[in-house]
Image (spheres, helix red, strand yellow):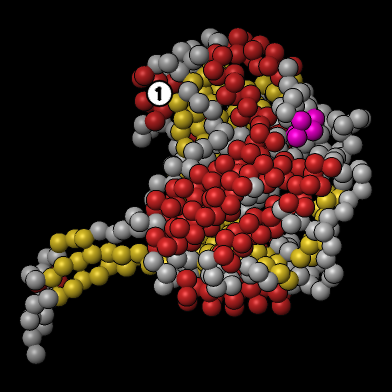
Amino acid sequence: MLPLKIINKSVLMNKEIINVLSALGIKDKQLGCSTGTKWMGSGIIMKTNSPVDGNNISDVVSTSIEDYEMTIETAENAFQIFRTIPSPKRGDLVRQFGDALRNQKENLGKLVSYEMGKSYQEGLGEVQEMIDICEFAVGLSRQLHGLTMHSERPLHRMYEQYHPIGIVGIISAFNFPVAVWSWNIALALVCGDVCVWKPSEKTPLCSIACQKIIEKVLTNNQMPEGISCLINGDANVGKWMTEDKRIPLISATGSTKMGRKVSEVVGKRLGKTLLELGGNNAIIITPNADIKMTIIGAVFGAVGTCGQRCTSTRRLIIHEDIYSKVVDSLKKAYNQLKIGDPLDIKNHIGPLIDKDSVNQYLNAIKQADKEGAKWIVKGKSLSGKGYESGCYVSPSIAEIDADASIVQTETFAPLLYVMKYSGSIENAIDIQNNVSQGLSSAIMTQNLQEAETFLSHWGSDCGIANVNIGTSGAEIGGAFGGEKDTGGGRESGSDAWKIYMRRQTNTINYSSDLPLAQGIKFDI
Protein backbone atom coordinates (compact mmCIF):
# COMPACT_ATOMS: atom_id res chain seq x y z
CA MET A 1 0.00 0.00 0.00
CA LEU A 2 1.35 3.42 -0.97
CA PRO A 3 1.80 6.17 1.61
CA LEU A 4 -0.80 8.90 1.16
CA LYS A 5 -0.32 12.62 1.47
CA ILE A 6 -2.84 15.44 1.51
CA ILE A 7 -2.74 17.34 -1.78
CA ASN A 8 0.15 19.77 -2.06
CA LYS A 9 0.30 20.98 -5.63
CA SER A 10 2.52 23.48 -7.36
CA VAL A 11 1.52 27.03 -7.99
CA LEU A 12 0.53 25.95 -11.49
CA MET A 13 -2.74 24.67 -10.09
CA ASN A 14 -5.32 27.26 -9.12
CA LYS A 15 -5.31 27.86 -5.35
CA GLU A 16 -9.10 27.60 -5.34
CA ILE A 17 -8.88 24.10 -6.82
CA ILE A 18 -6.32 23.06 -4.22
CA ASN A 19 -8.75 24.17 -1.51
CA VAL A 20 -11.57 22.22 -3.18
CA LEU A 21 -9.47 19.05 -3.31
CA SER A 22 -8.52 19.45 0.33
CA ALA A 23 -12.14 20.01 1.39
CA LEU A 24 -13.20 16.83 -0.42
CA GLY A 25 -10.33 14.79 1.05
CA ILE A 26 -8.60 14.17 -2.28
CA LYS A 27 -4.93 13.26 -1.89
CA ASP A 28 -1.82 13.42 -4.10
CA LYS A 29 -1.73 9.65 -4.25
CA GLN A 30 -5.22 8.34 -3.75
CA LEU A 31 -6.36 4.77 -3.18
CA GLY A 32 -9.15 4.07 -5.65
CA CYS A 33 -10.97 1.11 -4.11
CA SER A 34 -13.25 1.39 -1.09
CA THR A 35 -15.89 -0.53 0.86
CA GLY A 36 -16.74 2.52 2.97
CA THR A 37 -14.27 3.31 5.72
CA LYS A 38 -11.71 0.89 4.28
CA TRP A 39 -9.64 2.06 1.30
CA MET A 40 -7.53 -0.24 -0.84
CA GLY A 41 -5.54 -0.14 -4.02
CA SER A 42 -2.84 -2.41 -5.36
CA GLY A 43 -3.52 -2.15 -9.09
CA ILE A 44 -2.01 0.10 -11.74
CA ILE A 45 -1.51 3.85 -11.20
CA MET A 46 -4.05 6.05 -12.99
CA LYS A 47 -2.78 9.58 -13.64
CA THR A 48 -5.58 12.13 -13.60
CA ASN A 49 -4.97 15.27 -15.64
CA SER A 50 -7.44 18.12 -15.93
CA PRO A 51 -8.65 18.97 -19.46
CA VAL A 52 -9.02 22.55 -18.23
CA ASP A 53 -5.30 23.33 -17.87
CA GLY A 54 -3.50 20.00 -18.39
CA ASN A 55 -2.25 19.86 -14.78
CA ASN A 56 -1.95 16.54 -13.00
CA ILE A 57 -4.54 16.54 -10.23
CA SER A 58 -3.81 13.24 -8.50
CA ASP A 59 -2.52 9.74 -9.06
CA VAL A 60 -5.12 7.07 -8.29
CA VAL A 61 -4.13 3.51 -7.38
CA SER A 62 -6.62 1.27 -9.16
CA THR A 63 -8.37 -1.92 -8.06
CA SER A 64 -6.57 -5.26 -8.27
CA ILE A 65 -8.38 -8.60 -8.50
CA GLU A 66 -7.61 -9.17 -4.81
CA ASP A 67 -9.12 -5.77 -3.95
CA TYR A 68 -12.16 -6.62 -6.06
CA GLU A 69 -12.78 -9.96 -4.35
CA MET A 70 -12.55 -8.36 -0.92
CA THR A 71 -14.99 -5.65 -2.04
CA ILE A 72 -17.61 -8.09 -3.32
CA GLU A 73 -17.37 -10.28 -0.21
CA THR A 74 -17.83 -7.23 1.99
CA ALA A 75 -20.82 -6.09 -0.10
CA GLU A 76 -22.41 -9.56 0.15
CA ASN A 77 -22.13 -9.49 3.92
CA ALA A 78 -23.52 -5.97 4.11
CA PHE A 79 -26.56 -6.94 2.04
CA GLN A 80 -27.55 -9.64 4.54
CA ILE A 81 -27.95 -6.93 7.16
CA PHE A 82 -29.07 -3.97 5.06
CA ARG A 83 -32.06 -5.72 3.48
CA THR A 84 -33.58 -6.25 6.94
CA ILE A 85 -33.68 -2.52 7.72
CA PRO A 86 -37.15 -1.02 7.06
CA SER A 87 -37.31 0.95 3.85
CA PRO A 88 -38.28 4.28 5.52
CA LYS A 89 -35.16 3.94 7.69
CA ARG A 90 -33.10 3.40 4.55
CA GLY A 91 -34.84 6.45 3.11
CA ASP A 92 -33.63 8.51 6.05
CA LEU A 93 -30.05 7.53 5.19
CA VAL A 94 -30.62 8.87 1.69
CA ARG A 95 -32.09 12.06 3.17
CA GLN A 96 -28.91 12.57 5.17
CA PHE A 97 -26.85 11.88 2.07
CA GLY A 98 -28.76 14.63 0.27
CA ASP A 99 -28.01 17.04 3.13
CA ALA A 100 -24.31 16.12 2.96
CA LEU A 101 -24.35 16.87 -0.77
CA ARG A 102 -25.89 20.27 -0.08
CA ASN A 103 -23.00 21.05 2.25
CA GLN A 104 -20.46 20.13 -0.43
CA LYS A 105 -22.39 21.37 -3.48
CA GLU A 106 -19.96 24.13 -4.46
CA ASN A 107 -16.84 22.03 -3.88
CA LEU A 108 -18.15 18.99 -5.71
CA GLY A 109 -19.48 21.16 -8.55
CA LYS A 110 -16.04 22.71 -8.99
CA LEU A 111 -14.35 19.31 -8.97
CA VAL A 112 -16.76 18.07 -11.65
CA SER A 113 -15.96 21.14 -13.73
CA TYR A 114 -12.19 20.86 -13.25
CA GLU A 115 -11.82 17.10 -13.73
CA MET A 116 -14.39 16.68 -16.53
CA GLY A 117 -14.38 20.10 -18.21
CA LYS A 118 -18.05 21.14 -18.14
CA SER A 119 -18.92 24.66 -17.03
CA TYR A 120 -19.14 25.40 -13.33
CA GLN A 121 -22.87 26.14 -13.74
CA GLU A 122 -23.33 22.69 -15.24
CA GLY A 123 -21.21 21.18 -12.46
CA LEU A 124 -23.49 22.78 -9.88
CA GLY A 125 -26.49 21.56 -11.86
CA GLU A 126 -25.17 18.01 -11.80
CA VAL A 127 -24.79 18.07 -8.01
CA GLN A 128 -28.30 19.51 -7.78
CA GLU A 129 -29.49 16.45 -9.72
CA MET A 130 -27.94 14.32 -6.99
CA ILE A 131 -29.78 16.27 -4.32
CA ASP A 132 -33.05 16.04 -6.28
CA ILE A 133 -32.86 12.26 -6.71
CA CYS A 134 -32.21 11.90 -2.98
CA GLU A 135 -35.41 13.84 -2.28
CA PHE A 136 -37.28 11.66 -4.76
CA ALA A 137 -35.90 8.48 -3.19
CA VAL A 138 -36.87 9.55 0.33
CA GLY A 139 -40.51 9.78 -0.72
CA LEU A 140 -40.19 6.55 -2.66
CA SER A 141 -39.00 4.71 0.45
CA ARG A 142 -42.62 4.68 1.69
CA GLN A 143 -44.12 3.71 -1.67
CA LEU A 144 -42.42 0.46 -2.66
CA HIS A 145 -45.76 -1.23 -3.04
CA GLY A 146 -47.18 -3.99 -5.18
CA LEU A 147 -50.82 -4.83 -5.99
CA THR A 148 -53.54 -6.84 -4.32
CA MET A 149 -55.51 -8.97 -6.80
CA HIS A 150 -58.64 -11.06 -6.77
CA SER A 151 -58.18 -14.79 -7.01
CA GLU A 152 -60.35 -17.01 -9.18
CA ARG A 153 -60.37 -19.55 -6.35
CA PRO A 154 -62.72 -19.10 -3.37
CA LEU A 155 -61.23 -18.10 -0.01
CA HIS A 156 -57.93 -17.20 -1.66
CA ARG A 157 -56.22 -13.87 -2.11
CA MET A 158 -53.32 -12.78 -4.28
CA TYR A 159 -50.84 -10.00 -4.04
CA GLU A 160 -47.43 -9.06 -5.37
CA GLN A 161 -44.47 -7.65 -3.53
CA TYR A 162 -40.97 -6.42 -4.29
CA HIS A 163 -37.82 -7.57 -2.51
CA PRO A 164 -34.25 -6.22 -2.61
CA ILE A 165 -32.29 -7.78 -5.47
CA GLY A 166 -28.80 -7.81 -3.87
CA ILE A 167 -25.63 -6.18 -5.18
CA VAL A 168 -26.15 -3.56 -7.90
CA GLY A 169 -23.13 -3.02 -10.16
CA ILE A 170 -22.96 0.55 -11.49
CA ILE A 171 -20.86 1.51 -14.52
CA SER A 172 -20.89 5.24 -15.23
CA ALA A 173 -19.45 7.50 -17.93
CA PHE A 174 -17.17 10.53 -17.69
CA ASN A 175 -19.68 13.10 -18.96
CA PHE A 176 -21.85 12.91 -15.84
CA PRO A 177 -19.28 11.68 -13.36
CA VAL A 178 -21.47 11.99 -10.23
CA ALA A 179 -25.15 12.31 -11.21
CA VAL A 180 -25.59 8.92 -12.91
CA TRP A 181 -24.17 7.13 -9.88
CA SER A 182 -26.55 9.03 -7.61
CA TRP A 183 -29.58 8.09 -9.73
CA ASN A 184 -28.69 4.46 -9.17
CA ILE A 185 -27.51 4.42 -5.58
CA ALA A 186 -30.31 6.59 -4.18
CA LEU A 187 -32.97 4.26 -5.57
CA ALA A 188 -30.98 1.09 -4.87
CA LEU A 189 -30.47 2.01 -1.20
CA VAL A 190 -34.15 2.63 -0.46
CA CYS A 191 -34.87 -0.67 -2.24
CA GLY A 192 -32.54 -2.41 0.21
CA ASP A 193 -29.69 -3.12 -2.19
CA VAL A 194 -25.98 -2.47 -1.83
CA CYS A 195 -23.90 -0.93 -4.62
CA VAL A 196 -20.52 -1.44 -6.25
CA TRP A 197 -19.53 1.46 -8.50
CA LYS A 198 -17.06 1.28 -11.38
CA PRO A 199 -16.71 4.91 -12.57
CA SER A 200 -15.04 6.10 -15.76
CA GLU A 201 -11.26 5.87 -15.62
CA LYS A 202 -11.29 9.45 -17.00
CA THR A 203 -12.94 10.90 -13.86
CA PRO A 204 -11.86 8.85 -10.83
CA LEU A 205 -11.54 11.76 -8.41
CA CYS A 206 -15.22 12.67 -8.64
CA SER A 207 -16.07 9.12 -7.61
CA ILE A 208 -13.64 9.22 -4.69
CA ALA A 209 -15.14 12.51 -3.48
CA CYS A 210 -18.66 11.01 -3.65
CA GLN A 211 -17.59 7.88 -1.80
CA LYS A 212 -16.06 9.98 0.99
CA ILE A 213 -19.29 12.00 1.32
CA ILE A 214 -21.60 8.98 1.58
CA GLU A 215 -19.08 7.11 3.74
CA LYS A 216 -19.50 9.69 6.52
CA VAL A 217 -23.29 9.36 6.41
CA LEU A 218 -23.20 5.57 6.62
CA THR A 219 -20.58 5.60 9.39
CA ASN A 220 -22.53 8.14 11.45
CA ASN A 221 -25.53 5.79 11.27
CA GLN A 222 -23.43 2.75 12.24
CA MET A 223 -24.20 0.99 8.99
CA PRO A 224 -22.17 -2.11 8.04
CA GLU A 225 -19.12 -1.84 5.79
CA GLY A 226 -19.88 -2.55 2.13
CA ILE A 227 -23.19 -0.77 1.47
CA SER A 228 -21.51 1.69 -0.91
CA CYS A 229 -18.39 0.35 -2.64
CA LEU A 230 -16.02 1.85 -5.19
CA ILE A 231 -13.76 0.03 -7.69
CA ASN A 232 -11.72 2.42 -9.81
CA GLY A 233 -9.86 0.92 -12.73
CA ASP A 234 -9.78 0.20 -16.45
CA ALA A 235 -12.09 -1.94 -18.59
CA ASN A 236 -10.79 -5.12 -16.95
CA VAL A 237 -12.33 -4.06 -13.64
CA GLY A 238 -15.66 -3.56 -15.37
CA LYS A 239 -15.27 -7.00 -16.98
CA TRP A 240 -14.84 -8.64 -13.57
CA MET A 241 -18.08 -7.09 -12.47
CA THR A 242 -20.15 -7.92 -15.55
CA GLU A 243 -19.01 -11.57 -15.41
CA ASP A 244 -19.71 -11.93 -11.68
CA LYS A 245 -22.78 -14.07 -10.90
CA ARG A 246 -22.88 -12.54 -7.42
CA ILE A 247 -24.09 -9.29 -9.01
CA PRO A 248 -27.67 -9.79 -10.28
CA LEU A 249 -28.03 -6.34 -11.86
CA ILE A 250 -25.57 -4.28 -13.89
CA SER A 251 -26.59 -0.67 -14.57
CA ALA A 252 -24.33 0.65 -17.34
CA THR A 253 -24.19 4.12 -18.86
CA GLY A 254 -21.94 4.83 -21.84
CA SER A 255 -21.52 4.14 -25.54
CA THR A 256 -23.64 1.72 -27.53
CA LYS A 257 -20.48 -0.31 -28.23
CA MET A 258 -19.84 -0.70 -24.50
CA GLY A 259 -23.50 -1.52 -23.83
CA ARG A 260 -23.54 -4.33 -26.39
CA LYS A 261 -20.56 -5.97 -24.66
CA VAL A 262 -22.12 -5.59 -21.22
CA SER A 263 -25.45 -6.96 -22.43
CA GLU A 264 -23.80 -9.97 -24.04
CA VAL A 265 -21.68 -10.87 -21.01
CA VAL A 266 -24.44 -10.36 -18.42
CA GLY A 267 -27.01 -12.06 -20.64
CA LYS A 268 -24.87 -15.21 -20.85
CA ARG A 269 -25.19 -15.62 -17.08
CA LEU A 270 -28.89 -14.60 -17.22
CA GLY A 271 -28.29 -11.50 -15.16
CA LYS A 272 -30.27 -8.29 -15.51
CA THR A 273 -29.04 -5.11 -17.21
CA LEU A 274 -30.13 -1.51 -17.14
CA LEU A 275 -28.57 0.12 -20.22
CA GLU A 276 -28.53 3.86 -20.90
CA LEU A 277 -26.43 4.30 -24.03
CA GLY A 278 -25.84 6.72 -26.89
CA GLY A 279 -28.16 9.30 -28.40
CA ASN A 280 -28.50 10.97 -31.79
CA ASN A 281 -30.98 13.58 -30.77
CA ALA A 282 -32.92 15.87 -33.06
CA ILE A 283 -35.02 19.01 -32.78
CA ILE A 284 -37.76 19.45 -35.37
CA ILE A 285 -38.34 23.13 -36.13
CA THR A 286 -41.65 23.84 -37.82
CA PRO A 287 -42.88 27.08 -39.45
CA ASN A 288 -44.91 27.62 -36.27
CA ALA A 289 -41.87 27.69 -33.98
CA ASP A 290 -40.84 30.57 -31.74
CA ILE A 291 -37.42 31.25 -33.29
CA LYS A 292 -35.86 32.96 -30.26
CA MET A 293 -36.83 30.08 -27.96
CA THR A 294 -35.64 27.60 -30.57
CA ILE A 295 -32.17 29.11 -30.89
CA ILE A 296 -31.57 29.09 -27.13
CA GLY A 297 -32.59 25.43 -26.84
CA ALA A 298 -30.66 24.34 -29.93
CA VAL A 299 -27.42 26.13 -29.07
CA PHE A 300 -27.29 24.94 -25.47
CA GLY A 301 -28.23 21.45 -26.59
CA ALA A 302 -25.43 21.40 -29.16
CA VAL A 303 -22.55 23.04 -27.24
CA GLY A 304 -23.42 22.44 -23.56
CA THR A 305 -20.80 20.18 -21.94
CA CYS A 306 -18.93 20.73 -25.23
CA GLY A 307 -21.39 18.38 -26.93
CA GLN A 308 -20.60 15.49 -24.57
CA ARG A 309 -24.08 14.72 -23.26
CA CYS A 310 -25.99 11.66 -24.32
CA THR A 311 -28.89 14.12 -24.77
CA SER A 312 -26.83 16.66 -26.75
CA THR A 313 -28.57 18.02 -29.84
CA ARG A 314 -26.97 16.42 -32.90
CA ARG A 315 -29.50 17.26 -35.63
CA LEU A 316 -31.82 20.14 -36.51
CA ILE A 317 -34.61 19.22 -38.91
CA ILE A 318 -35.88 22.56 -40.19
CA HIS A 319 -38.84 23.30 -42.44
CA GLU A 320 -37.70 24.74 -45.75
CA ASP A 321 -39.82 27.89 -45.34
CA ILE A 322 -37.85 29.04 -42.29
CA TYR A 323 -34.55 27.28 -42.97
CA SER A 324 -32.54 30.37 -43.92
CA LYS A 325 -33.88 32.40 -41.00
CA VAL A 326 -33.00 29.69 -38.46
CA VAL A 327 -29.53 29.05 -39.91
CA ASP A 328 -28.70 32.79 -39.94
CA SER A 329 -29.78 33.07 -36.29
CA LEU A 330 -27.70 30.02 -35.38
CA LYS A 331 -24.63 31.46 -37.03
CA LYS A 332 -25.04 34.75 -35.13
CA ALA A 333 -25.44 32.87 -31.84
CA TYR A 334 -22.33 30.75 -32.46
CA ASN A 335 -20.30 33.90 -33.14
CA GLN A 336 -21.14 35.09 -29.62
CA LEU A 337 -19.96 31.92 -27.84
CA LYS A 338 -16.95 32.23 -25.54
CA ILE A 339 -14.61 29.24 -25.18
CA GLY A 340 -12.22 28.80 -22.27
CA ASP A 341 -11.78 27.86 -18.62
CA PRO A 342 -15.15 26.37 -17.56
CA LEU A 343 -14.71 27.71 -14.03
CA ASP A 344 -14.85 31.23 -15.48
CA ILE A 345 -18.58 32.04 -15.63
CA LYS A 346 -18.02 34.32 -18.66
CA ASN A 347 -17.27 31.27 -20.83
CA HIS A 348 -19.99 29.16 -22.46
CA ILE A 349 -17.88 26.20 -23.58
CA GLY A 350 -15.10 24.34 -21.81
CA PRO A 351 -12.79 21.63 -23.17
CA LEU A 352 -13.42 18.13 -24.43
CA ILE A 353 -12.46 15.45 -21.93
CA ASP A 354 -9.08 14.59 -23.53
CA LYS A 355 -6.95 14.79 -26.67
CA ASP A 356 -8.36 11.53 -28.02
CA SER A 357 -11.79 13.15 -28.07
CA VAL A 358 -10.33 16.13 -29.94
CA ASN A 359 -8.93 13.78 -32.59
CA GLN A 360 -12.29 11.99 -32.89
CA TYR A 361 -13.98 15.36 -33.42
CA LEU A 362 -11.51 16.42 -36.12
CA ASN A 363 -11.86 13.03 -37.85
CA ALA A 364 -15.66 13.45 -37.84
CA ILE A 365 -15.24 16.84 -39.53
CA LYS A 366 -13.05 15.23 -42.21
CA GLN A 367 -15.60 12.47 -42.70
CA ALA A 368 -18.40 15.03 -43.04
CA ASP A 369 -16.30 16.79 -45.69
CA LYS A 370 -16.08 13.54 -47.64
CA GLU A 371 -19.84 13.11 -47.44
CA GLY A 372 -20.61 16.52 -48.89
CA ALA A 373 -21.06 18.73 -45.84
CA LYS A 374 -21.47 22.47 -46.40
CA TRP A 375 -20.05 24.28 -43.40
CA ILE A 376 -22.05 27.04 -41.79
CA VAL A 377 -19.51 27.11 -38.97
CA LYS A 378 -16.43 24.89 -39.24
CA GLY A 379 -14.81 23.99 -35.97
CA LYS A 380 -11.15 23.36 -35.21
CA SER A 381 -8.78 22.59 -32.35
CA LEU A 382 -7.63 25.62 -30.37
CA SER A 383 -4.15 26.47 -29.17
CA GLY A 384 -2.38 29.32 -27.44
CA LYS A 385 -2.94 31.05 -24.12
CA GLY A 386 -5.71 29.45 -22.12
CA TYR A 387 -5.79 26.37 -24.33
CA GLU A 388 -2.56 24.73 -23.15
CA SER A 389 -4.22 21.40 -22.31
CA GLY A 390 -4.83 20.71 -26.00
CA CYS A 391 -8.45 19.75 -25.28
CA TYR A 392 -10.25 22.88 -26.51
CA VAL A 393 -12.15 23.05 -29.80
CA SER A 394 -14.56 25.43 -31.48
CA PRO A 395 -18.03 24.08 -32.36
CA SER A 396 -19.31 23.23 -35.84
CA ILE A 397 -22.53 23.46 -37.83
CA ALA A 398 -22.78 21.48 -41.05
CA GLU A 399 -25.52 21.35 -43.65
CA ILE A 400 -25.65 17.73 -44.77
CA ASP A 401 -27.93 15.04 -46.13
CA ALA A 402 -29.92 13.23 -43.43
CA ASP A 403 -28.87 9.84 -44.81
CA ALA A 404 -25.11 10.53 -44.66
CA SER A 405 -23.33 7.84 -42.64
CA ILE A 406 -21.67 10.41 -40.34
CA VAL A 407 -25.13 11.73 -39.43
CA GLN A 408 -26.18 8.23 -38.38
CA THR A 409 -23.27 8.09 -35.92
CA GLU A 410 -23.07 9.80 -32.54
CA THR A 411 -20.03 12.08 -32.40
CA PHE A 412 -19.39 13.01 -28.78
CA ALA A 413 -18.41 16.60 -29.55
CA PRO A 414 -20.01 19.96 -30.49
CA LEU A 415 -20.88 18.92 -34.06
CA LEU A 416 -24.39 19.95 -35.15
CA TYR A 417 -26.03 18.86 -38.42
CA VAL A 418 -28.80 20.89 -40.05
CA MET A 419 -31.15 19.61 -42.74
CA LYS A 420 -34.38 20.63 -44.45
CA TYR A 421 -37.77 19.03 -44.56
CA SER A 422 -40.80 19.96 -46.65
CA GLY A 423 -44.51 19.29 -46.38
CA SER A 424 -46.15 17.89 -43.24
CA ILE A 425 -44.80 17.23 -39.78
CA GLU A 426 -44.90 13.49 -40.54
CA ASN A 427 -42.07 13.99 -43.03
CA ALA A 428 -39.90 15.57 -40.34
CA ILE A 429 -40.73 12.77 -37.88
CA ASP A 430 -39.66 10.18 -40.48
CA ILE A 431 -36.27 11.90 -40.79
CA GLN A 432 -35.89 12.12 -37.03
CA ASN A 433 -36.69 8.45 -36.44
CA ASN A 434 -34.40 7.23 -39.23
CA VAL A 435 -31.38 6.66 -36.97
CA SER A 436 -30.48 3.67 -34.82
CA GLN A 437 -30.54 5.62 -31.53
CA GLY A 438 -33.72 6.62 -29.70
CA LEU A 439 -32.93 8.68 -26.61
CA SER A 440 -34.15 12.29 -26.73
CA SER A 441 -36.16 14.34 -29.19
CA ALA A 442 -37.91 17.69 -29.37
CA ILE A 443 -40.26 19.73 -31.52
CA MET A 444 -40.48 23.51 -31.64
CA THR A 445 -43.99 24.58 -32.57
CA GLN A 446 -46.92 26.66 -31.35
CA ASN A 447 -49.31 24.42 -33.30
CA LEU A 448 -51.25 21.94 -31.16
CA GLN A 449 -51.80 19.44 -33.98
CA GLU A 450 -48.08 19.30 -34.77
CA ALA A 451 -47.17 18.87 -31.10
CA GLU A 452 -49.69 16.10 -30.49
CA THR A 453 -48.72 14.25 -33.67
CA PHE A 454 -45.10 14.35 -32.50
CA LEU A 455 -46.15 12.80 -29.16
CA SER A 456 -48.49 10.21 -30.66
CA HIS A 457 -47.99 6.46 -31.23
CA TRP A 458 -46.79 7.26 -34.75
CA GLY A 459 -44.66 10.20 -33.62
CA SER A 460 -41.21 10.30 -32.01
CA ASP A 461 -39.76 6.85 -31.30
CA CYS A 462 -37.51 8.15 -28.50
CA GLY A 463 -37.70 7.54 -24.77
CA ILE A 464 -37.86 11.32 -24.27
CA ALA A 465 -40.04 13.56 -26.44
CA ASN A 466 -40.25 17.29 -25.62
CA VAL A 467 -42.35 20.17 -26.89
CA ASN A 468 -40.84 23.67 -26.94
CA ILE A 469 -37.78 22.73 -24.95
CA GLY A 470 -34.55 21.23 -26.25
CA THR A 471 -33.29 17.67 -26.13
CA SER A 472 -30.70 18.26 -23.44
CA GLY A 473 -31.43 18.03 -19.75
CA ALA A 474 -34.06 15.96 -18.00
CA GLU A 475 -35.80 16.28 -14.65
CA ILE A 476 -35.36 13.42 -12.21
CA GLY A 477 -39.13 12.93 -11.75
CA GLY A 478 -39.44 11.17 -15.10
CA ALA A 479 -37.83 7.88 -16.07
CA PHE A 480 -34.67 8.60 -18.07
CA GLY A 481 -33.58 6.46 -21.01
CA GLY A 482 -34.34 5.54 -24.59
CA GLU A 483 -35.13 2.92 -27.18
CA LYS A 484 -33.31 1.04 -29.96
CA ASP A 485 -29.51 1.37 -29.68
CA THR A 486 -29.95 3.55 -26.59
CA GLY A 487 -30.52 0.31 -24.71
CA GLY A 488 -34.10 0.43 -23.43
CA GLY A 489 -33.20 0.98 -19.77
CA ARG A 490 -34.79 3.56 -17.49
CA GLU A 491 -33.14 5.33 -14.57
CA SER A 492 -34.17 8.00 -12.09
CA GLY A 493 -37.88 8.79 -11.69
CA SER A 494 -41.33 7.30 -12.28
CA ASP A 495 -41.28 3.53 -11.57
CA ALA A 496 -37.61 3.03 -12.51
CA TRP A 497 -37.13 1.68 -8.97
CA LYS A 498 -38.66 -1.66 -9.94
CA ILE A 499 -35.56 -2.87 -11.79
CA TYR A 500 -33.59 -2.69 -8.53
CA MET A 501 -35.89 -5.27 -6.95
CA ARG A 502 -37.08 -8.80 -7.53
CA ARG A 503 -40.79 -9.22 -8.04
CA GLN A 504 -42.83 -11.90 -6.31
CA THR A 505 -46.46 -13.00 -6.70
CA ASN A 506 -48.10 -14.51 -3.60
CA THR A 507 -51.28 -16.59 -3.29
CA ILE A 508 -52.74 -17.31 0.16
CA ASN A 509 -55.32 -20.02 0.76
CA TYR A 510 -57.34 -19.43 3.93
CA SER A 511 -59.90 -22.18 3.23
CA SER A 512 -59.96 -25.79 4.38
CA ASP A 513 -59.88 -27.04 0.77
CA LEU A 514 -57.28 -27.01 -2.00
CA PRO A 515 -59.00 -25.97 -5.22
CA LEU A 516 -56.68 -25.84 -8.26
CA ALA A 517 -56.49 -23.02 -10.74
CA GLN A 518 -58.48 -23.21 -14.01
CA GLY A 519 -60.87 -25.67 -12.37
CA ILE A 520 -58.46 -28.61 -12.68
CA LYS A 521 -59.58 -31.71 -10.76
CA PHE A 522 -56.96 -33.81 -8.98
CA ASP A 523 -58.61 -36.01 -6.36
CA ILE A 524 -56.70 -38.54 -4.28
Amino acid beneath label 1: Ala
Residue 62 lies left or right of residue 196; in this view the side is right
Quadrant of the drawing holding the N terminus: bottom right
In what element is the residue under mark 1? helix
Q: Residue 52 at x, y = what percent?
A: 81, 39
Q: Quadrant of residue 399?
A: top right
Identify the residue at the far front of this view. Answer: 220
**Looking at the image, which residue is at 55% across and 13% down?**
291
Please name whichever residue, 147 or 444, is drawn nearer the observer in this view of the structure: 147
Q: Is residue 110 magenta?
A: no
**Helix, strand or loop for the magenta stretch, by majority:** loop
Identify the residue at the far bottom of this view. Answer: 524
State whether residue 423 appears in this view.
no
Q: Mark 1 points at which residue?
A: 451
Give the magenta part as a residue range: 340-344
Q: Residue 80 at x, y = what percent?
A: 47, 76
Q: Residue 441 at x, y = what percent?
A: 51, 32
Please name whichever residue, 419 or 469, is drawn nearer the observer in this view of the structure: 469
Query: Is 432 rendered above or below residue 151?
Result: above
Please name whichever residue, 113 or 454, is drawn nearer the observer in this view of the structure: 113
Query: Is 317 rendered above or below residue 71?
Result: above
**Looking at the image, which residue is at 92% across and 30% down?**
384
Residue 383 lies left or right of residue 346; in this view the side is right
**Looking at the image, which residue is at 46% across and 13% down?**
288
Q: Residue 4 at x, y = what percent?
A: 83, 66
Q: Is residue 342 magenta?
A: yes
Q: In which quarter of the image is residue 350?
A: top right
State whether residue 88 appears in this view.
yes
Count of all numbered marks drawn on residues in the image:
1
Please name whichever residue, 95 or 340, is drawn nearer the observer in this view of the structure: 95
Quadrant of the drawing holding the C terminus: bottom left
